[in-house]
Image (cartoon, helix red, strand yellow):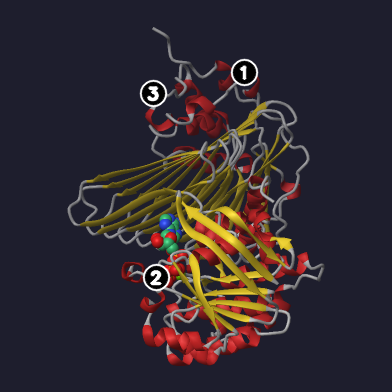
Amino acid sequence: MLSIKNLHASVEGEEILKGINLEIKAGEVHAIMGPNGSGKSTLSQVLAGNETFEVTEGEVTLNGENLLEQETEERAREGVFLAFQYPVEIPGVSNLQFLRTAVNAKRKHRGEEELNAAEFMKLAKDVSRQVDLDPSFLKRGVNEGFSGGEKKRNEILQALLLEPKLAILDETDSGLDIDALKVVSDGVNALRSEDRAILMVTHYQRLLNHIVPDYVHVLAGGRIIKSGGRELALELEEKGYGWLGVKDDDASN
Amino acid sequence: MKTAPMLSSAFLHPAGQTLPEPLLALRRERAGRLVDMPLPTRKTENWKYSSRHLKLADDMAISLPVGGKTGHSLAVPGYKVVFVNGVMIPEASEFPDFDGLSIRSFNDLPEEDAGKLADRLGSTLDPKQVQFAHLNGARFEDGLLIQLKPGAVLDQPLFVIHETVGDASGSAYPRVFVDAGANSQMTLVEEYISDGDAPVLVDTVTEFNLADGANLTSIRLNMEGENVQHIGATGVVQQRNSRFESHCVGFGGPLRRHDLQVRLEGEGAETKLNGVVVTQGKQHYDNHTSIDHVAAHCNSEETYRNIAADESHAVFNGRIHIHQDAQQSNADMNNKNLLLSSKAEIDTKPELEIYADDVKCAHGATIGQLDRIALFYLVSRGIGRRQANVLLTMAFINELVEQIPVEAVRETAQTRLNEFFEQTFIEEN
Ligand SMILES: Nc1ncnc2c1ncn2[C@@H]1O[C@H](COP(=O)(O)OP(=O)(O)OP(=O)(O)O)[C@@H](O)[C@H]1O
Ligand SMILES: [Mg+2]
């Protein structure tokens, strides 16, 4: 599914990703943990195609296709989905209009019939109930004035509507109360399937009680410095990152 | 020393002589005053950004012929008056049969009514600020007099379609005069459209008089073509507790100029002015608004948005004048601007003159660009770049477009704006 080889990326001349290697197969769930500022969001954004970051070396393929050559919207239509760590507020564009435009862009790409307003409304209402978001949120501006937790649920709502092949969830569990964490993890578990890969960035092992990952990686200083099974998350929770040789200032900035 | 350019005397000869005598007399008098009228230049303060877009060739002085085919317009059922080249076309109109409303062509007025009208034409406008309203006064061939009796509440919006047919060069001088009686209510939609592609000048004047407690909504859609230089003035005078609401939606052209002047003369009057302007290519749009708080306890709220693409240029000049006796005035003016290209230009200027001490007056202006992070968010969901740009651009003005109170007009505006932006972002995939 996803293959990342020796990926280097920099922003404003400063190298953030310093040679990432990662293989994710269909059906697998991988968790990425690591100190603040280690490059987790940068990796997520680079995969989605954010041009703020310049890829200086390495390659990324999705099902054999060169991902880095594709525009952001092509990647999305081919099945890459990124749940943003900080979902963007867009006043003036209704959530409903946004979601429908996105879903129809995807359907068109797949050669499927576009959904009309009524058909889409029904679908959107069903899915918003699934993530425990009142359908009234569909009428508001995209993420406009949503609480932190509501924004995260809106991200999962989009993932469920867009049915990606590769879902990258950047701290979708941060800032959630206990009930919301359950809702969001149920959403993610609903996404789990044989032909889908999930990459989750998280700081908390508690999420991994709900969504059991196949692999856990530690990203520090722009490199994956350790990989293991789910027990690695427990070990990190207990010991922090120090024992892996991560410098204190790396772990705290 | 170089002498200032003058209005060519060719412009001082109206064609038709069909108007009732008092209006003909008025026209002659106005024309007399325009002899040696200097044309605005860069040094004319209220025209400094627009004078270079004014191109009045002599062949544009000719009055465009009366009649001609009427083209596309808002397909609306209901009350509709159609003007072509400034002259009413009764066959194309659907006059309301509504008690309390009188709608007459200037050409149909009895001498006495024409005399009364002649005394009042132009009275809502500040003569020093609207040079071209005088030209309209010297040249109008017809006009629409709308009188709403006290207490009358018009059950449907009245559409006035001003179409300019420019198969050959020339000019047209549409004119509307509205008298809304005490506690009357109506919505007037003015739609400016054009046909043909010869260079033409459209010089318009619309005047609204609101008696005590009158409630009037004005919607102005400017959708003329690339051959039209449009210079329009709207004057509003409001008496006690009256309410005026204006929604202007303007699409750019070689020259678009609109002066909107509101005088709050009676206590407790309220005015709300919304405006949306979009320009692309080398288009130019200049809005000058002016609100005079003459009486105490009045409210004004003004919100204008400009969006300029390519190498186009938009101007907003918002003047608020709070007179000495206008205590407890509340004035709020807001102008936000969006530049879609580094070569586009927007000039915005608030002009506040406050002579009363107990007032609330707020104003703000911003100029910004599309938010790149929002754009990335949209395309990361598979939305095409062009569509994402259109969505974000529409988002900038949706709040105002959604306030247009007549559904058919709102939808037309939305559709046209969408098409306009799709054109703007054509090179994006
Ligand atoms: N647009 C940018 N301009 C400058 N520096 C940036 C930019 N984006 C990220 N960085 C820097 O890159 C480094 C990695 O940031 P990134 O957001 O990837 O960290 P992270 O691992 O996601 O951290 P967190 O756990 O706090 O979310 C940080 O030092 C950050 O300041
Ligand atoms: Mg991050």
Q: Are marks 1 and 3 on the same chain?
A: yes
Whether the residue carrying mark 1 lies under 8 Å from ligand 1 is answered with: no
Q: Residue at 36% across / 71% down in the picture?
A: A251
Q: CA distance from mark 3 to mark 2?
A: 58 Å
Q: CA distance from mark 2 to mark 1?
A: 71 Å
Whether the residue carrying mark 2 lies under 8 Å from ligand 1 is answered with: yes
* Disc 2 target residue: A36
Q: Are marks 1 and 3 in contact (CB under 8 Å)?
A: no
On the image, the x and y values in percent for residue B186 come to 53, 61
Residue B329 seen in this snapshot: yes
Looking at the picture, does residue A154 appear above or below residue B51? below
Residue type indicated by callout 1: Asp
Residue A88 seen in this snapshot: no
Classify residue A148 as left or right of residue B409. Answer: left
Which is nearer the eye, B25 or A54? A54
Residue A250: quarter of image = bottom left
* Disc 1 target residue: B58
Assign a secondary structure to mark 1: helix
On the image, the x and y values in percent for residue B38 come to 44, 19
Classify residue B63 as left or right of residue B114. Answer: right
Rendered image: mark on residue B43: 3
Which is nearer the eye, B362 or B307? B307
Q: Nearer the viewer, mark 1 or mark 3?
A: 3
